Image: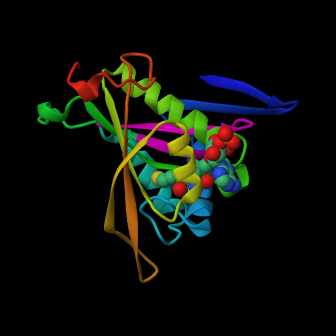
Amino acid sequence: MNSVALQPGRSLEVERAERLSDADLAELAEATDAAIIEGGGFGWVEPQGRAALERHFRGVLLVPERELFVARLDGHAVGSALLVRPPRNNEAQAFAATLTHAYIAPYARGFGLARRLVDKVEERAAALGHRVLNLDVRETQATAIALFESLGYVHWGTHPYYARVKGQTVAGRFYFKTLEPGRGRATGDLIDGAV
Ligand SMILES: CC(C)(COP(=O)(O)OP(=O)(O)OC[C@H]1O[C@@H](n2cnc3c(N)ncnc32)[C@H](O)[C@@H]1OP(=O)(O)O)[C@@H](O)C(=O)NCCC(=O)NCCS
């Protein structure tokens, strides 16, 4: 577990979750609905309610190609992200993984948790042998775009019909970052074919 003292009495933690307590599930459901109401950034547009979101997170833990990372502020779950690995049959793309569903509840933003969340997902992806991390984000998510670009993600394309949100079509920006083996830092080697 990664724990960093923020200021007296506050702590930031990001962990890979292999199980979730009832308290974790309730806090994650609350954080997720709060993020959706504020403007989302991942699939949901309307708040889902506690029962549906708890089922969602329980389900995520059961999917072999998905790893859940939980961000905590002062020990409470306030956000999460998913590392999605390619299925076993996709040998041609086994080198790449995807970071998705990243969010921090509005009441826990600005402390640096999202930066730590992305760092942790990158570290894990690199440790698993992935050399590329892909992600995509609605072009309206300015904070997320600033975060990903500051972390070295390369914008390679924009999909003009990426999402429909409250009756409006929203474009989406697609990014990748190359990872150094086992270290989670960017490298240009892969671009030249020297995997
Ligand atoms: C994007 C998001 C995850 C950032 O969470 P956060 O915990 O507040 O982010 P951090 O505190 O780690 O800040 C990371 C960086 O984001 C940027 N940032 C944070 N708050 C910002 C703000 N209010 N305005 C502009 N940039 C901001 C800064 O570049 C910051 O870098 P710094 O560490 O050098 O200051 C959060 O705003 C969120 O959940 N948004 C909705 C969901 C979403 O867009 N998800 C991503 C797509 S799936």
Q: Residue furthest right?
A: 8
The region drawn magenta spans: 65-82
Question: Which residue is at the front of the view, 167 or 171?
Answer: 171
Q: Is residue 67 above or below residue 131?
A: below
User: Left or right: 72 with respect to 120?
Assistant: right
Please say which color scheme the image uses. Answer: rainbow
Question: The N terminus lies in which quarter of the figure?
Answer: top right
Residue at the front extreme, as displayed: 192
Task: Name the residue: 52% across, 36% down.
Answer: 151
Can residue 92 be seen here?
Answer: yes
Instruction: Inspect the magenta stretch and tell me whether residue 66 lies in it.
Output: yes
At 27% from the left edge and 34% from the top edge, which residue is drawn? 96
Residue that protrudes farthest toward the top in the picture: 182
Q: Quadrant of residue 50?
A: bottom right
* Image location (x, y in percent) of residue 17: 49, 33
Is 68 inside the magenta-drawn segment? yes
Depth check: 104 or 130 in front? Answer: 130
Image quadrant assignment for residue 161:
bottom left
Q: Nearer the viewer, residue 118 or 104?
A: 118
Apparent side of residue 194 relative to residue 130 in the rendered image (left or right):
left
Q: Position of residue 74 (x, y in %)?
A: 75, 37
> In terms of depth relative to the viewer, which is nearer, 47 or 129?
129
Rendered image quadrant of residue 165: bottom left
Q: Is residue 5 left or right of residue 159?
A: right
Q: Residue at x 59, y 54 (%)?
A: 143
Give the total number of marks visible in the rendering: 0
Q: Which quadrant is home to the C terminus? A: top left
